[in-house]
Protein backbone atom coordinates (compact mmCIF):
# COMPACT_ATOMS: atom_id res chain seq x y z
CA UNK A 1 0.00 0.00 0.00
CA UNK A 2 2.89 2.34 0.76
CA UNK A 3 4.03 2.16 -2.87
CA UNK A 4 0.58 3.22 -3.99
CA UNK A 5 0.39 5.99 -1.45
CA UNK A 6 3.69 7.41 -2.59
CA UNK A 7 2.37 7.57 -6.12
CA UNK A 8 -0.81 9.27 -4.94
CA UNK A 9 1.32 11.73 -3.05
CA UNK A 10 3.35 12.42 -6.20
CA UNK A 11 0.09 12.95 -8.11
CA UNK A 12 -1.26 15.43 -5.59
CA UNK A 13 2.15 17.12 -5.54
CA UNK A 14 1.94 17.69 -9.29
CA UNK A 15 -1.62 19.01 -9.05
CA UNK A 16 -0.74 21.39 -6.19
CA UNK A 17 2.33 22.59 -8.09
CA UNK A 18 0.14 23.38 -11.11
CA UNK A 19 -2.21 25.41 -8.95
CA UNK A 20 0.67 27.36 -7.46
CA UNK A 21 2.22 28.01 -10.87
CA UNK A 22 -1.12 29.18 -12.29
CA UNK A 23 -1.87 31.52 -9.41
CA UNK A 24 1.64 32.94 -9.30
CA UNK A 25 2.01 33.17 -13.09
CA UNK A 26 2.44 36.98 -13.13
CA UNK A 27 5.09 36.76 -10.40
CA UNK A 28 7.19 33.79 -11.49
CA UNK A 29 7.18 34.03 -15.27
CA UNK A 30 10.57 35.46 -16.23
CA UNK A 31 9.24 37.43 -19.22
CA UNK A 32 5.96 38.91 -20.42
CA UNK A 33 4.38 35.98 -22.35
CA UNK A 34 3.38 38.33 -25.16
CA UNK A 35 6.65 40.25 -25.42
CA UNK A 36 7.88 39.96 -29.00
CA UNK A 37 11.63 40.07 -29.54
CA UNK A 38 12.46 39.88 -33.23
CA UNK A 39 16.21 39.97 -32.49
CA UNK A 40 15.84 36.64 -30.76
CA UNK A 41 13.58 34.49 -32.93
CA UNK A 42 13.61 30.69 -32.46
CA UNK A 43 16.56 30.82 -30.10
CA UNK A 44 17.45 27.40 -28.61
CA UNK A 45 17.29 26.92 -24.83
CA UNK A 46 19.92 29.00 -23.03
CA UNK A 47 20.56 30.56 -19.64
CA UNK A 48 18.42 33.57 -20.58
CA UNK A 49 15.56 31.51 -22.04
CA UNK A 50 15.49 28.08 -20.37
CA UNK A 51 13.04 26.59 -22.86
CA UNK A 52 14.12 28.75 -25.83
CA UNK A 53 12.01 31.25 -27.77
CA UNK A 54 9.28 30.85 -30.38
CA UNK A 55 8.88 32.17 -33.94
CA UNK A 56 8.22 35.70 -32.61
CA UNK A 57 11.02 35.62 -30.06
CA UNK A 58 8.64 35.16 -27.13
CA UNK A 59 9.93 33.25 -24.11
CA UNK A 60 8.55 29.69 -24.26
CA UNK A 61 8.82 29.09 -20.52
CA UNK A 62 6.76 32.19 -19.70
CA UNK A 63 4.15 31.18 -22.26
CA UNK A 64 3.98 27.72 -20.72
CA UNK A 65 3.53 29.16 -17.24
CA UNK A 66 0.59 31.24 -18.47
CA UNK A 67 -0.64 28.27 -20.47
CA UNK A 68 -0.97 26.33 -17.20
CA UNK A 69 -3.77 28.73 -16.25
CA UNK A 70 -5.68 27.85 -19.40
CA UNK A 71 -5.38 24.11 -18.82
CA UNK A 72 -6.47 24.45 -15.24
CA UNK A 73 -9.48 26.56 -16.18
CA UNK A 74 -10.56 24.31 -19.03
CA UNK A 75 -10.07 21.17 -16.95
CA UNK A 76 -12.15 22.39 -14.04
CA UNK A 77 -14.99 24.14 -15.86
CA UNK A 78 -15.46 21.45 -18.53
CA UNK A 79 -15.37 18.65 -15.98
CA UNK A 80 -17.62 20.56 -13.61
CA UNK A 81 -20.23 20.85 -16.34
CA UNK A 82 -19.90 17.17 -17.29
CA UNK A 83 -20.19 16.07 -13.66
CA UNK A 84 -23.23 18.30 -13.12
CA UNK A 85 -25.10 16.89 -16.12
CA UNK A 86 -24.00 13.32 -15.45
CA UNK A 87 -24.93 13.52 -11.79
CA UNK A 88 -28.45 14.79 -12.41
CA UNK A 89 -29.21 12.41 -15.28
CA UNK A 90 -27.63 9.42 -13.52
CA UNK A 91 -29.47 10.17 -10.28
CA UNK A 92 -32.82 10.54 -12.00
CA UNK A 93 -32.30 7.40 -14.13
CA UNK A 94 -31.15 5.29 -11.22
CA UNK A 95 -33.70 6.56 -8.73
CA UNK A 96 -36.85 6.37 -10.83
CA UNK A 97 -35.99 3.48 -13.17
CA UNK A 98 -38.64 2.46 -15.70
CA UNK A 99 -39.13 4.43 -18.90
CA UNK A 100 -37.23 7.49 -17.62
CA UNK A 101 -34.21 5.28 -17.04
CA UNK A 102 -34.60 3.64 -20.45
CA UNK A 103 -34.88 7.00 -22.19
CA UNK A 104 -31.81 8.47 -20.50
CA UNK A 105 -29.70 5.39 -21.01
CA UNK A 106 -30.60 5.17 -24.72
CA UNK A 107 -29.47 8.78 -25.03
CA UNK A 108 -26.23 7.81 -23.30
CA UNK A 109 -25.82 4.95 -25.81
CA UNK A 110 -26.26 7.35 -28.72
CA UNK A 111 -23.67 9.72 -27.34
CA UNK A 112 -21.26 6.89 -26.54
CA UNK A 113 -21.21 5.29 -29.96
CA UNK A 114 -20.28 8.56 -31.50
CA UNK A 115 -16.82 9.63 -32.51
CA UNK A 116 -17.03 12.43 -29.93
CA UNK A 117 -13.95 14.19 -31.19
CA UNK A 118 -15.65 14.68 -34.59
CA UNK A 119 -18.63 16.28 -32.91
CA UNK A 120 -16.48 18.56 -30.74
CA UNK A 121 -14.49 19.61 -33.77
CA UNK A 122 -17.59 20.38 -35.81
CA UNK A 123 -19.36 22.31 -33.09
CA UNK A 124 -16.35 24.40 -32.07
CA UNK A 125 -15.45 25.27 -35.62
CA UNK A 126 -19.03 26.38 -36.29
CA UNK A 127 -19.20 28.42 -33.12
CA UNK A 128 -16.34 30.87 -32.87
CA UNK A 129 -13.38 29.08 -31.28
CA UNK A 130 -13.00 30.57 -27.81
CA UNK A 131 -12.00 29.21 -24.46
CA UNK A 132 -15.59 29.36 -23.17
CA UNK A 133 -16.98 27.46 -26.14
CA UNK A 134 -14.31 24.80 -25.72
CA UNK A 135 -15.09 24.33 -22.06
CA UNK A 136 -18.82 24.07 -22.73
CA UNK A 137 -18.49 21.66 -25.64
CA UNK A 138 -16.01 19.38 -23.87
CA UNK A 139 -18.36 19.38 -20.88
CA UNK A 140 -21.43 18.65 -22.99
CA UNK A 141 -19.76 15.64 -24.63
CA UNK A 142 -18.14 14.17 -21.53
CA UNK A 143 -20.97 13.39 -19.12
CA UNK A 144 -21.88 9.85 -20.22
CA UNK A 145 -19.42 7.98 -18.03
CA UNK A 146 -20.52 9.88 -14.94
CA UNK A 147 -24.18 9.19 -15.74
CA UNK A 148 -23.49 5.45 -15.83
CA UNK A 149 -21.50 5.53 -12.60
CA UNK A 150 -24.05 7.55 -10.65
CA UNK A 151 -26.93 5.47 -12.02
CA UNK A 152 -25.23 2.24 -10.91
CA UNK A 153 -24.65 3.68 -7.44
CA UNK A 154 -28.27 4.83 -7.19
CA UNK A 155 -29.65 1.47 -8.27
CA UNK A 156 -27.64 -0.32 -5.60
CA UNK A 157 -28.54 2.25 -2.94
CA UNK A 158 -32.20 3.05 -3.55
CA UNK A 159 -33.59 -0.05 -1.81
CA UNK A 160 -31.38 0.29 1.26
CA UNK A 161 -32.94 0.73 4.67
CA UNK A 162 -31.84 4.33 5.15
CA UNK A 163 -33.70 5.30 1.96
CA UNK A 164 -36.83 3.50 3.17
CA UNK A 165 -36.49 5.21 6.51
CA UNK A 166 -36.24 8.60 4.82
CA UNK A 167 -39.29 7.80 2.76
CA UNK A 168 -41.19 6.64 5.83
CA UNK A 169 -40.74 9.99 7.52
CA UNK A 170 -42.11 11.65 4.41
CA UNK A 171 -39.00 13.07 2.74
CA UNK A 172 -39.52 14.35 -0.79
CA UNK A 173 -37.87 12.64 -3.76
CA UNK A 174 -35.50 15.55 -4.27
CA UNK A 175 -34.46 15.41 -0.62
CA UNK A 176 -33.84 11.67 -0.77
CA UNK A 177 -31.88 11.99 -4.01
CA UNK A 178 -29.66 14.89 -3.06
CA UNK A 179 -29.32 14.63 0.72
CA UNK A 180 -29.57 10.91 1.37
CA UNK A 181 -28.30 8.95 -1.64
CA UNK A 182 -25.99 11.35 -3.47
CA UNK A 183 -23.50 11.78 -0.59
CA UNK A 184 -22.95 8.02 -0.73
CA UNK A 185 -22.05 8.24 -4.40
CA UNK A 186 -19.61 11.13 -3.93
CA UNK A 187 -16.47 8.99 -3.85
CA UNK A 188 -16.97 7.57 -7.33
CA UNK A 189 -17.99 11.01 -8.62
CA UNK A 190 -14.79 12.49 -7.23
CA UNK A 191 -12.71 9.81 -8.97
CA UNK A 192 -14.54 10.41 -12.24
CA UNK A 193 -13.99 14.15 -11.87
CA UNK A 194 -10.26 13.83 -11.30
CA UNK A 195 -9.83 11.53 -14.29
CA UNK A 196 -12.19 13.75 -16.30
CA UNK A 197 -10.00 16.81 -15.74
CA UNK A 198 -7.07 14.91 -17.24
CA UNK A 199 -9.18 13.99 -20.27
CA UNK A 200 -10.45 17.55 -20.72
CA UNK A 201 -6.90 18.93 -20.63
CA UNK A 202 -5.85 16.41 -23.31
CA UNK A 203 -8.82 17.34 -25.52
CA UNK A 204 -8.22 21.07 -25.14
CA UNK A 205 -4.58 20.71 -26.09
CA UNK A 206 -5.50 18.65 -29.17
CA UNK A 207 -8.06 21.26 -30.24
CA UNK A 208 -5.67 24.14 -29.67
CA UNK A 209 -3.02 22.21 -31.59
CA UNK A 210 -5.40 21.90 -34.56
CA UNK A 211 -5.95 25.66 -34.42
CA UNK A 212 -9.57 25.60 -33.25
CA UNK A 213 -8.96 25.78 -29.53
CA UNK A 214 -7.46 28.63 -27.55
CA UNK A 215 -6.55 31.30 -30.09
CA UNK A 216 -3.16 32.98 -30.26
CA UNK A 217 -1.83 35.28 -28.91
CA UNK A 218 -3.29 33.75 -25.72
CA UNK A 219 -0.74 31.09 -24.83
CA UNK A 220 -1.86 27.49 -24.34
CA UNK A 221 0.22 24.32 -24.34
CA UNK A 222 -1.61 23.11 -27.43
CA UNK A 223 -1.02 26.20 -29.52
CA UNK A 224 2.67 26.37 -28.63
CA UNK A 225 2.85 22.85 -30.08
CA UNK A 226 1.30 24.16 -33.32
CA UNK A 227 4.28 26.49 -33.60
CA UNK A 228 6.43 23.45 -32.87
CA UNK A 229 4.93 21.63 -35.84
CA UNK A 230 5.42 24.63 -38.13
CA UNK A 231 9.09 24.78 -37.18
CA UNK A 232 9.60 21.06 -36.76
CA UNK A 233 12.89 20.89 -38.66
CA UNK A 234 14.60 23.74 -36.79
CA UNK A 235 13.12 24.15 -33.30
CA UNK A 236 12.65 20.91 -31.34
CA UNK A 237 12.23 22.80 -28.05
CA UNK A 238 8.91 24.22 -29.20
CA UNK A 239 7.60 20.65 -29.53
CA UNK A 240 9.28 18.98 -26.58
CA UNK A 241 8.52 21.11 -23.51
CA UNK A 242 4.79 21.94 -23.85
CA UNK A 243 4.04 18.28 -24.57
CA UNK A 244 6.00 17.23 -21.48
CA UNK A 245 3.95 19.69 -19.46
CA UNK A 246 0.71 18.13 -20.74
CA UNK A 247 2.02 14.62 -20.07
CA UNK A 248 3.10 15.40 -16.49
CA UNK A 249 -0.17 17.19 -15.74
CA UNK A 250 -2.29 14.33 -17.02
CA UNK A 251 -0.17 11.77 -15.16
CA UNK A 252 -0.63 13.86 -12.01
CA UNK A 253 -4.43 13.93 -12.21
CA UNK A 254 -4.59 10.24 -13.13
CA UNK A 255 -2.40 9.25 -10.17
CA UNK A 256 -4.51 11.35 -7.85
CA UNK A 257 -7.73 9.88 -9.25
CA UNK A 258 -6.55 6.29 -8.86
CA UNK A 259 -5.32 7.08 -5.38
CA UNK A 260 -8.74 8.39 -4.37
CA UNK A 261 -10.36 5.33 -5.89
CA UNK A 262 -8.14 2.94 -3.96
CA UNK A 263 -8.65 4.87 -0.75
CA UNK A 264 -12.43 5.01 -1.12
CA UNK A 265 -12.98 1.41 -2.18
CA UNK A 266 -11.57 -1.03 0.36
CA UNK A 267 -12.46 -3.99 -1.86
CA UNK A 268 -9.66 -3.02 -4.23
CA UNK A 269 -6.99 -3.27 -1.56
CA UNK A 270 -4.87 -6.34 -1.91
CA UNK B 1 -28.63 -16.20 -33.53
CA UNK B 2 -30.34 -14.81 -36.63
CA UNK B 3 -33.04 -13.27 -34.50
CA UNK B 4 -30.41 -11.61 -32.34
CA UNK B 5 -28.67 -10.24 -35.41
CA UNK B 6 -31.87 -8.84 -36.91
CA UNK B 7 -32.77 -7.24 -33.61
CA UNK B 8 -29.38 -5.60 -33.35
CA UNK B 9 -29.46 -4.26 -36.91
CA UNK B 10 -32.99 -2.91 -36.43
CA UNK B 11 -31.87 -1.21 -33.24
CA UNK B 12 -29.17 0.59 -35.20
CA UNK B 13 -31.74 2.51 -37.26
CA UNK B 14 -33.23 4.69 -34.49
CA UNK B 15 -29.74 5.11 -33.06
CA UNK B 16 -28.45 6.45 -36.37
CA UNK B 17 -31.48 8.70 -36.76
CA UNK B 18 -30.86 10.07 -33.28
CA UNK B 19 -27.24 10.77 -34.10
CA UNK B 20 -28.07 12.57 -37.35
CA UNK B 21 -30.76 14.68 -35.68
CA UNK B 22 -28.34 15.82 -32.98
CA UNK B 23 -25.58 16.62 -35.47
CA UNK B 24 -27.82 18.40 -37.92
CA UNK B 25 -29.46 20.62 -35.37
CA UNK B 26 -26.33 21.44 -33.44
CA UNK B 27 -24.56 22.38 -36.64
CA UNK B 28 -27.33 24.51 -38.08
CA UNK B 29 -28.16 26.26 -34.84
CA UNK B 30 -24.62 27.60 -34.63
CA UNK B 31 -24.44 31.28 -35.54
CA UNK B 32 -23.14 32.25 -38.97
CA UNK B 33 -23.87 30.78 -42.37
CA UNK B 34 -21.53 28.93 -44.72
CA UNK B 35 -22.25 31.58 -47.34
CA UNK B 36 -20.82 34.31 -45.09
CA UNK B 37 -17.36 33.47 -46.34
CA UNK B 38 -18.35 34.05 -49.94
CA UNK B 39 -20.34 37.21 -49.34
CA UNK B 40 -18.12 38.90 -46.78
CA UNK B 41 -15.04 38.56 -48.93
CA UNK B 42 -16.83 40.10 -51.90
CA UNK B 43 -17.38 43.88 -51.66
CA UNK B 44 -19.88 43.77 -54.52
CA UNK B 45 -22.22 41.33 -52.79
CA UNK B 46 -25.63 42.78 -52.00
CA UNK B 47 -28.26 41.66 -49.55
CA UNK B 48 -30.22 40.29 -52.48
CA UNK B 49 -27.32 38.15 -53.64
CA UNK B 50 -26.84 36.88 -50.13
CA UNK B 51 -30.48 35.78 -50.05
CA UNK B 52 -30.10 34.11 -53.45
CA UNK B 53 -27.08 32.15 -52.26
CA UNK B 54 -28.97 31.08 -49.15
CA UNK B 55 -31.94 29.88 -51.15
CA UNK B 56 -29.66 28.07 -53.60
CA UNK B 57 -28.31 26.00 -50.71
CA UNK B 58 -31.80 25.77 -49.16
CA UNK B 59 -30.41 27.50 -46.06
CA UNK B 60 -33.32 29.96 -45.85
CA UNK B 61 -35.82 27.24 -44.90
CA UNK B 62 -36.60 26.13 -41.34
CA UNK B 63 -34.15 23.58 -39.93
CA UNK B 64 -36.76 20.84 -39.70
CA UNK B 65 -37.55 21.20 -43.40
CA UNK B 66 -33.85 21.13 -44.25
CA UNK B 67 -33.37 18.02 -42.13
CA UNK B 68 -36.28 16.20 -43.77
CA UNK B 69 -35.04 17.03 -47.24
CA UNK B 70 -31.55 15.83 -46.24
CA UNK B 71 -33.12 12.62 -44.93
CA UNK B 72 -35.13 12.14 -48.14
CA UNK B 73 -32.01 12.45 -50.23
CA UNK B 74 -30.19 10.09 -47.89
CA UNK B 75 -32.88 7.45 -48.44
CA UNK B 76 -31.91 7.49 -52.10
CA UNK B 77 -28.24 7.18 -51.18
CA UNK B 78 -27.58 10.83 -52.00
CA UNK B 79 -25.50 12.78 -49.49
CA UNK B 80 -25.86 16.04 -51.38
CA UNK B 81 -23.41 18.30 -53.18
CA UNK B 82 -20.41 19.79 -51.38
CA UNK B 83 -20.54 23.52 -50.63
CA UNK B 84 -16.86 23.84 -51.46
CA UNK B 85 -15.74 25.31 -54.77
CA UNK B 86 -15.43 21.91 -56.50
CA UNK B 87 -19.22 21.27 -56.11
CA UNK B 88 -18.74 17.52 -56.26
CA UNK B 89 -21.13 14.96 -54.75
CA UNK B 90 -20.26 14.41 -51.08
CA UNK B 91 -20.40 10.63 -51.48
CA UNK B 92 -17.66 10.74 -54.16
CA UNK B 93 -15.47 12.93 -52.02
CA UNK B 94 -15.82 10.63 -49.03
CA UNK B 95 -15.53 7.35 -50.92
CA UNK B 96 -12.21 8.23 -52.52
CA UNK B 97 -10.76 9.03 -49.09
CA UNK B 98 -12.40 6.33 -46.99
CA UNK B 99 -10.15 3.35 -47.96
CA UNK B 100 -6.90 4.85 -46.63
CA UNK B 101 -8.55 5.77 -43.33
CA UNK B 102 -9.99 2.29 -42.97
CA UNK B 103 -6.68 0.65 -43.87
CA UNK B 104 -4.77 2.69 -41.28
CA UNK B 105 -7.38 2.07 -38.58
CA UNK B 106 -7.50 -1.63 -39.40
CA UNK B 107 -3.71 -1.96 -39.26
CA UNK B 108 -3.56 -0.16 -35.96
CA UNK B 109 -6.32 -2.34 -34.49
CA UNK B 110 -4.28 -5.36 -35.60
CA UNK B 111 -1.15 -3.99 -33.94
CA UNK B 112 -3.08 -3.17 -30.79
CA UNK B 113 -4.29 -6.77 -30.52
CA UNK B 114 -0.98 -8.41 -31.40
CA UNK B 115 1.01 -6.29 -28.96
CA UNK B 116 -1.41 -5.57 -26.13
CA UNK B 117 -2.74 -9.09 -25.53
CA UNK B 118 0.67 -10.69 -24.84
CA UNK B 119 1.68 -7.72 -22.67
CA UNK B 120 -1.49 -8.03 -20.61
CA UNK B 121 -1.26 -11.81 -20.28
CA UNK B 122 2.43 -11.87 -19.37
CA UNK B 123 1.96 -9.06 -16.83
CA UNK B 124 -0.84 -10.99 -15.16
CA UNK B 125 0.93 -14.36 -15.19
CA UNK B 126 4.10 -12.83 -13.76
CA UNK B 127 2.30 -10.42 -11.48
CA UNK B 128 4.58 -7.97 -9.62
CA UNK B 129 7.62 -9.09 -11.63
CA UNK B 130 9.97 -6.53 -13.12
CA UNK B 131 8.21 -6.95 -16.50
CA UNK B 132 4.84 -6.27 -14.89
CA UNK B 133 6.15 -3.14 -13.18
CA UNK B 134 7.82 -1.77 -16.30
CA UNK B 135 4.67 -2.44 -18.31
CA UNK B 136 2.38 -0.81 -15.78
CA UNK B 137 4.51 2.34 -15.93
CA UNK B 138 4.35 2.17 -19.73
CA UNK B 139 0.58 1.78 -19.61
CA UNK B 140 0.22 4.67 -17.21
CA UNK B 141 2.29 6.97 -19.37
CA UNK B 142 0.52 5.65 -22.47
CA UNK B 143 -2.79 6.85 -21.08
CA UNK B 144 -1.44 10.32 -20.48
CA UNK B 145 0.58 10.99 -23.63
CA UNK B 146 -1.07 13.39 -26.06
CA UNK B 147 -0.76 11.38 -29.28
CA UNK B 148 -0.24 14.43 -31.45
CA UNK B 149 2.76 15.33 -29.32
CA UNK B 150 4.14 11.82 -29.66
CA UNK B 151 3.66 12.20 -33.41
CA UNK B 152 5.68 15.43 -33.37
CA UNK B 153 8.50 13.79 -31.39
CA UNK B 154 8.58 10.81 -33.76
CA UNK B 155 8.67 13.16 -36.73
CA UNK B 156 11.58 15.10 -35.21
CA UNK B 157 13.49 11.95 -34.29
CA UNK B 158 12.89 9.61 -37.23
CA UNK B 159 12.22 12.17 -39.91
CA UNK B 160 14.31 15.24 -39.16
CA UNK B 161 17.22 14.06 -36.99
CA UNK B 162 17.88 10.60 -38.44
CA UNK B 163 16.09 10.94 -41.76
CA UNK B 164 14.88 7.33 -41.68
CA UNK B 165 11.22 7.83 -42.43
CA UNK B 166 9.15 10.29 -44.46
CA UNK B 167 7.02 12.56 -42.29
CA UNK B 168 4.18 13.59 -44.52
CA UNK B 169 1.89 12.35 -47.26
CA UNK B 170 1.53 8.83 -48.59
CA UNK B 171 3.92 8.82 -51.53
CA UNK B 172 7.37 10.11 -52.35
CA UNK B 173 7.79 12.63 -55.17
CA UNK B 174 9.37 10.00 -57.43
CA UNK B 175 6.56 7.50 -56.77
CA UNK B 176 5.56 7.32 -60.45
CA UNK B 177 9.04 6.18 -61.49
CA UNK B 178 9.34 3.33 -59.02
CA UNK B 179 8.72 -0.34 -59.75
CA UNK B 180 5.63 -1.92 -58.22
CA UNK B 181 7.71 -3.51 -55.47
CA UNK B 182 9.41 -0.22 -54.65
CA UNK B 183 6.06 1.55 -54.67
CA UNK B 184 4.77 -0.84 -52.03
CA UNK B 185 7.83 -0.28 -49.87
CA UNK B 186 7.46 3.46 -50.33
CA UNK B 187 3.82 3.32 -49.21
CA UNK B 188 4.70 1.13 -46.25
CA UNK B 189 7.43 3.54 -45.15
CA UNK B 190 4.93 6.39 -45.25
CA UNK B 191 2.46 4.39 -43.21
CA UNK B 192 4.77 3.32 -40.35
CA UNK B 193 4.56 6.49 -38.25
CA UNK B 194 0.81 7.18 -38.73
CA UNK B 195 -0.13 3.57 -37.93
CA UNK B 196 2.14 3.49 -34.89
CA UNK B 197 0.72 6.75 -33.60
CA UNK B 198 -2.87 5.71 -34.13
CA UNK B 199 -2.25 2.35 -32.43
CA UNK B 200 -0.41 3.81 -29.45
CA UNK B 201 -3.43 5.18 -27.61
CA UNK B 202 -5.29 1.87 -27.76
CA UNK B 203 -2.28 -0.18 -26.65
CA UNK B 204 -2.35 1.08 -23.09
CA UNK B 205 -6.09 0.55 -22.69
CA UNK B 206 -6.24 -2.99 -24.01
CA UNK B 207 -3.13 -4.29 -22.26
CA UNK B 208 -4.34 -2.97 -18.92
CA UNK B 209 -7.74 -4.50 -19.53
CA UNK B 210 -6.22 -7.86 -20.52
CA UNK B 211 -4.09 -7.87 -17.38
CA UNK B 212 -7.09 -7.23 -15.13
CA UNK B 213 -9.14 -9.88 -16.92
CA UNK B 214 -6.43 -12.47 -16.77
CA UNK B 215 -5.87 -11.83 -13.05
CA UNK B 216 -9.55 -12.39 -12.44
CA UNK B 217 -9.75 -15.53 -14.54
CA UNK B 218 -6.68 -17.11 -12.92
CA UNK B 219 -8.46 -16.97 -9.55
CA UNK B 220 -11.51 -18.88 -10.83
CA UNK B 221 -12.34 -22.38 -9.66
CA UNK B 222 -12.03 -23.99 -13.07
CA UNK B 223 -8.40 -22.91 -13.23
CA UNK B 224 -7.88 -24.57 -9.86
CA UNK B 225 -9.55 -27.67 -11.30
CA UNK B 226 -7.29 -27.59 -14.34
CA UNK B 227 -4.24 -27.35 -12.10
CA UNK B 228 -5.58 -30.05 -9.79
CA UNK B 229 -5.96 -32.56 -12.58
CA UNK B 230 -2.28 -32.07 -13.34
CA UNK B 231 -2.25 -30.01 -16.52
CA UNK B 232 0.98 -28.23 -17.28
CA UNK B 233 1.17 -24.55 -16.40
CA UNK B 234 1.36 -23.80 -20.13
CA UNK B 235 -1.91 -25.55 -20.84
CA UNK B 236 -3.61 -23.98 -17.86
CA UNK B 237 -2.64 -20.46 -18.85
CA UNK B 238 -2.85 -20.52 -22.62
CA UNK B 239 -5.69 -22.95 -23.11
CA UNK B 240 -8.00 -22.56 -20.17
CA UNK B 241 -7.33 -19.06 -18.87
CA UNK B 242 -6.46 -17.10 -21.99
CA UNK B 243 -9.57 -18.06 -23.90
CA UNK B 244 -11.83 -16.86 -21.15
CA UNK B 245 -9.86 -13.69 -20.60
CA UNK B 246 -9.91 -12.85 -24.30
CA UNK B 247 -13.71 -12.79 -24.51
CA UNK B 248 -14.48 -9.46 -22.82
CA UNK B 249 -11.58 -7.87 -24.70
CA UNK B 250 -13.63 -8.18 -27.89
CA UNK B 251 -16.10 -5.67 -26.51
CA UNK B 252 -13.32 -3.28 -25.55
CA UNK B 253 -12.05 -3.38 -29.11
CA UNK B 254 -15.53 -2.50 -30.35
CA UNK B 255 -15.70 0.41 -27.95
CA UNK B 256 -12.30 1.70 -29.04
CA UNK B 257 -13.48 2.30 -32.61
CA UNK B 258 -14.93 5.81 -32.05
CA UNK B 259 -11.62 6.84 -30.51
CA UNK B 260 -9.67 5.48 -33.46
CA UNK B 261 -11.89 7.23 -35.99
CA UNK B 262 -11.80 10.48 -34.03
CA UNK B 263 -8.04 10.17 -33.77
CA UNK B 264 -7.73 9.93 -37.53
CA UNK B 265 -8.56 13.64 -37.74
CA UNK B 266 -5.47 14.39 -35.69
CA UNK B 267 -2.91 12.10 -37.27
CA UNK B 268 -4.16 12.61 -40.83
CA UNK B 269 -3.84 16.35 -40.33
CA UNK B 270 -0.36 16.04 -38.81
CA UNK B 271 0.98 13.59 -41.37
CA UNK B 272 -0.88 15.18 -44.32
CA UNK B 273 -2.60 11.92 -45.22
CA UNK B 274 -5.44 12.37 -47.71
CA UNK B 275 -8.01 10.40 -45.71
CA UNK B 276 -11.46 11.01 -44.30
CA UNK B 277 -10.16 12.70 -41.15
CA UNK B 278 -8.30 15.32 -43.15
CA UNK B 279 -11.35 15.90 -45.35
CA UNK B 280 -13.41 16.36 -42.20
CA UNK B 281 -11.00 18.94 -40.84
CA UNK B 282 -11.00 20.87 -44.11
CA UNK B 283 -14.79 20.71 -44.45
CA UNK B 284 -15.33 21.87 -40.91
CA UNK B 285 -13.03 24.81 -41.50
CA UNK B 286 -14.89 25.70 -44.73
CA UNK B 287 -18.33 25.18 -43.12
CA UNK B 288 -19.17 22.65 -45.78
CA UNK B 289 -22.38 21.33 -44.10
CA UNK B 290 -23.17 18.46 -46.50
CA UNK B 291 -19.66 17.02 -46.34
CA UNK B 292 -19.47 17.38 -42.57
CA UNK B 293 -22.87 15.68 -42.17
CA UNK B 294 -21.80 12.93 -44.58
CA UNK B 295 -18.62 12.17 -42.66
CA UNK B 296 -20.37 12.32 -39.30
CA UNK B 297 -22.86 9.80 -40.67
CA UNK B 298 -20.16 7.50 -42.06
CA UNK B 299 -18.24 7.74 -38.79
CA UNK B 300 -21.35 6.78 -36.84
CA UNK B 301 -22.11 3.88 -39.20
CA UNK B 302 -18.52 2.58 -38.94
CA UNK B 303 -18.75 2.78 -35.16
CA UNK B 304 -22.09 0.99 -35.01
CA UNK B 305 -20.96 -1.71 -37.42
CA UNK B 306 -17.76 -2.17 -35.41
CA UNK B 307 -19.78 -2.53 -32.21
CA UNK B 308 -22.12 -4.97 -33.94
CA UNK B 309 -19.25 -7.13 -35.15
CA UNK B 310 -17.76 -7.08 -31.65
CA UNK B 311 -21.05 -8.07 -30.03
CA UNK B 312 -21.79 -10.79 -32.57
CA UNK B 313 -18.34 -12.34 -32.28
CA UNK B 314 -18.75 -12.20 -28.53
CA UNK B 315 -22.03 -14.06 -28.82
CA UNK B 316 -20.44 -16.60 -31.16
CA UNK B 317 -17.53 -17.13 -28.80
CA UNK B 318 -19.48 -17.25 -25.56
CA UNK B 319 -22.46 -19.62 -25.36
CA UNK B 320 -23.73 -17.95 -22.17
CA UNK B 321 -24.51 -14.76 -24.09
CA UNK B 322 -26.25 -16.56 -26.92
CA UNK B 323 -28.77 -18.20 -24.63
CA UNK B 324 -29.76 -15.11 -22.68
Image (tube, rainbow, N blue to C red):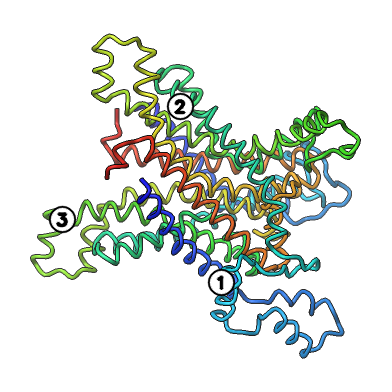
Of tags 2 and 1, the one toward the viewer is: 1
- What's the mark number on residue B71? 1
Q: Badge 2, how many Cα within 10 Å: few under 14, some, many 20+? A: many
Element type at mark 3 = loop
- Report the side of B211 relative to A18 (left or right): left
Which residue, given by chain and number where applicable, does mark 3 sit on? A159
Which residue is painted at 55% across and 77% down in the image?
A: B68
* The one of B59 and B312 positioned closer to us in this rendering: B312
Which image quarter is the N terminus of chain B in? top left
Which residue is painted at 65% across and 41% down in the image?
A: B103
Give how far across and how far down residue B83 sits, in percent. 73, 70
Residue B44: image quadrant is bottom right
Element type at mark 2 = helix
Give how far across and how far down residue B304 sits, in percent. 49, 52
Q: Chain of mark 3?
A: A
* The one of A32 and A138 positioned closer to us in this rendering: A138
- Report the side of B302 relative to A186 (left or right): right
Whether A107 is drawn above or below B125: the answer is below
Mark 2 and mark 1 on one chain: yes
Amino acid sequence: MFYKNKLTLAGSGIVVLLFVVSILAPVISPYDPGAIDLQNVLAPPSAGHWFGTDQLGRDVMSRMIWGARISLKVGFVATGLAIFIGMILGAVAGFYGGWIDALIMRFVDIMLCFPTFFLILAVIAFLEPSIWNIMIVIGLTGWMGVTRLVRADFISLRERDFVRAARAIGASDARIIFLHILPNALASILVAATLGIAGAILTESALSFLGIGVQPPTPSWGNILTAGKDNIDIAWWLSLYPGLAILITVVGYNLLGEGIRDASDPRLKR
Amino acid sequence: MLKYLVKRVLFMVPLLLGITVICFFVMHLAPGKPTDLQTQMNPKSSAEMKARLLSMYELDKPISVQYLSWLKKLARGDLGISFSSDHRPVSDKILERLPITIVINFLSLLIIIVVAVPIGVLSAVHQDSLFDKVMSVFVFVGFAVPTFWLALLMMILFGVQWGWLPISGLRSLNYEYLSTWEQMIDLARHLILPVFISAFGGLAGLSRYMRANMLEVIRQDYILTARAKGLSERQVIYKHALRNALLPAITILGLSIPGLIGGSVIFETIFAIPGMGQLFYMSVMARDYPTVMGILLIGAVLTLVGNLIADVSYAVADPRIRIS
